[in-house]
Each structure stands twice: as structure tokens, then as C-alpha cells.
């Protein structure tokens, strides 16, 4: 299963008011493991970035002046997400902006769901933790994900953090203790330890002839005493 955890930064809140994407960050997961592949791109929005937005992500008008426009990066971006399930926190926001960018190109690209499925982790978190704060920062605290480098929002950093949160949130029980309640009412925490993707293959040790013979004798003994040894079927 291939998933792409995605985040964007924008010039403002509403694409209907002409706001545009200025940064895209993506992290690839395959069978719930980090592959090491990422997609990251700053974009010239061809318009001014609102001061309030700059205070959130720190990306200035001067910084994006020499960056490519969305139409120039669209083919590479679509190649990266095509066929994957997109994992996005508050998906309607990011998907709405991406669909707006596709529409502005007038090239018949369609919409995001023509290329990828979409999973909204905000909607998932609200079902799992009703009545609680479910922002990305709140989920980091709840699941013990280190977001200490997140002084400002950044698309690639946020995508990496969201990937950790998503894996913990969907990984089943995160504490062996049934009474592991914190003072703030949060449940037990777990931390992700990432293993290097460059490591030797595990050594496979096959059973010896003597061990196979002993195993067969044990199965036959079970069959004799119980009358139903499923491992002999």
C-alpha cells in the first residue's frame, strides 16, 4: 500500500478569494514504512502573500519571486502522488487549493481524486478523540511526537510530523498499561524510532533434518492424542 502524506502552505485562507499555493511537502509511505522518498517544492503564487499568512509559515514574497509557477511543477507533482492514498490533516483545505490550481491551468487536469484517494486525519482524530483538541500540535502532544522544531509551519516538516502522528494514531494500542492516564487526561504515549532503510537483510536459518524429524514426530503425537492436529492437514 502506497501512501503520500501531504501538506501545503498558501498565500491566505480562501482559494475563492484568489489565494494560491506557495509550498508543497510530501513524504512517501509504503506498507506503513517510510521509504525515504519525498517531494518538496516552493512555488511562485503570482500574487502577494498576506501578512497574517507570513506570520504563520514565514515564507515571504521576496523568497518566492524566483520560484517556478504551479503549472511548471504540476507534472512532477502529479507523478509523485499518482495512484497513492493522500494522507492530509484537514484535507478539504489542501485538496481545495490543489483543485483550484488545476482549474487555473485550463489544461483539463481534473481534480485530485482523479489521481489519488484522500484520507483526512483531522476527521479521523475527531472520531477517535471527540470533544478534544485535534490540531496537529495537539496530536503531537497526545501521541508523544517531537515537534520541537516546528516554530513556524513548513510543508515538508509538517508532512513528516503528520506521518509520525498518523502511524501512531492508526497503530492500535499505544500503551501496555490500562491505567496510564496523564494529569492532562491524555492516554499513554509512544515514540517512533525510525530504522535506517539501508541495512543488511535478515539472516534466514533453516531447520536441520534432525529438527524437522523431531517436529514431525511431535505433530504425529498430537494427532494421536487429540485426533485433530491442524498442522498435519
Image (tube, helix red, strand yellow):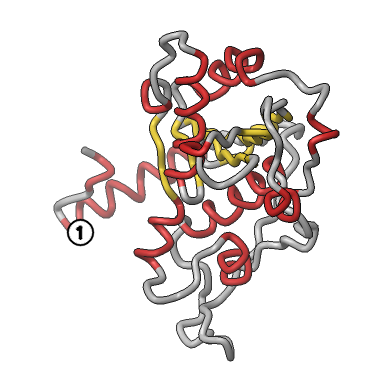
Q: Position of residue 70 (x, y in %)?
A: 63, 20
Q: Position of residue 98 (x, y in %)?
A: 50, 30
Rendered image quadrant of residue 117 = top left
Q: Residue furthest top?
A: 107
Does residue 116 show up?
Answer: yes
Residue placed most toward the observer, 141 or 176: 141
Q: Residue furthest left?
A: 227
The residue lying at 54 percent from left, 34 percent from top is 18
Relative to 33, does residue 161 appear above or below in the rendering?
below
The residue lying at 51 percent from left, 75 percent from top is 176
Q: On the picture, is 132 further left or further right than 220?
A: right
The residue lying at 63 percent from left, 40 percent from top is 10
Relative to 198, does residue 137 appear above or below in the rendering?
below
**Quadrant of the image for the C terminus?**
top left
Q: On the picture, is 85 further left or further right than 36?
A: left
Q: On the picture, is 91 further left or further right than 35?
A: left
Q: Position of residue 170 (x, y in %)?
A: 45, 55
Rendered image quadrant of residue 59 = top right
Q: Position of residue 154 (x, y in %)?
A: 72, 46
Relative to 77, does residue 141 appear above or below in the rendering?
below
**Quadrant of the image for the N terminus?**
top left
Total count of labels:
1
**Label 1: few (<14), some or many (≥20) within 10 Å?**
few
Residue placed most toward the observer, 140 or 98: 98
The residue lying at 61 percent from left, 33 percent from top is 21
Q: On the picture, is 89 further left or further right than 222?
A: right
Does residue 208 show up?
Answer: no
Identify the residue under disc 1.
Answer: 225
Q: Secondary structure at mark 1?
A: helix
Amino acid at each position: 500500500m502506497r501512501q503520500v502524506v501531504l501538506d501545503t502552505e498558501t498565500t491566505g485562507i480562501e482559494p475563492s478569494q484568489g489565494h494560491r499555493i506557495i509550498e508543497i511537502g510530501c513524504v512517501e509511505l509504503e506498507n506503513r514504512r517510510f521509504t525515504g522518498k519525498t517531494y518538496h517544492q516552493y512555488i511562485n503564487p503570482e500574487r502577494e502573500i498576506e501578512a497574517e499568512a507570513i506570520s504563520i509559515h514565514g515564507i515571504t514574497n521576496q523568497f518566492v519571486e524566483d520560484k517556478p509557477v504551479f503549472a511548471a511543477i504540476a507534472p512532477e507533482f502529479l507523478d509523485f502522488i499518482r495512484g497513492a492514498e493522500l494522507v492530509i490533516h484537514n484535507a478539504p483545505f489542501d485538496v481545495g487549493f490543489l483543485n483550484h490550481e488545476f482549474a487555473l491551468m485550463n489544461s483539463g487536469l481534473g481534480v485530485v481524486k482523479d489521481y489519488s484517494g484522500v484520507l483526512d486525519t483531522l476527521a479521523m482524530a475527531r472520531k477517535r478523540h471527540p470533544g478534544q483538541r485535534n490540531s496537529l500540535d495537539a496530536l503531537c502532544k497526545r501521541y508523544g511526537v517531537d515537534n520541537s522544531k516546528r516554530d513556524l509551519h513548513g510543508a515538508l516538516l509538517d508532512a513528516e510530523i503528520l506521518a509520525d502522528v498518523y502511524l501512531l494514531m492508526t497503530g492500535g494500542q499505544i500503551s501496555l498499561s490500562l491505567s496510564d492516564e496523564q494529569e492532562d487526561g491524555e492516554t499513554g504515549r509512544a515514540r517512533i524510532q525510525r530504522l535506517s532503510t539501508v541495512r543488511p537483510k535478515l539472516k534466514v536459518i533453516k531447520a536441520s533434518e534432525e529438527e524437522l524429524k523431531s517436529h514431525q514426530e511431535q505433530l504425529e503425537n498430537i494427532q494421536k492424542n487429540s485426533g485433530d492436529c491442524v498442522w498435519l492437514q
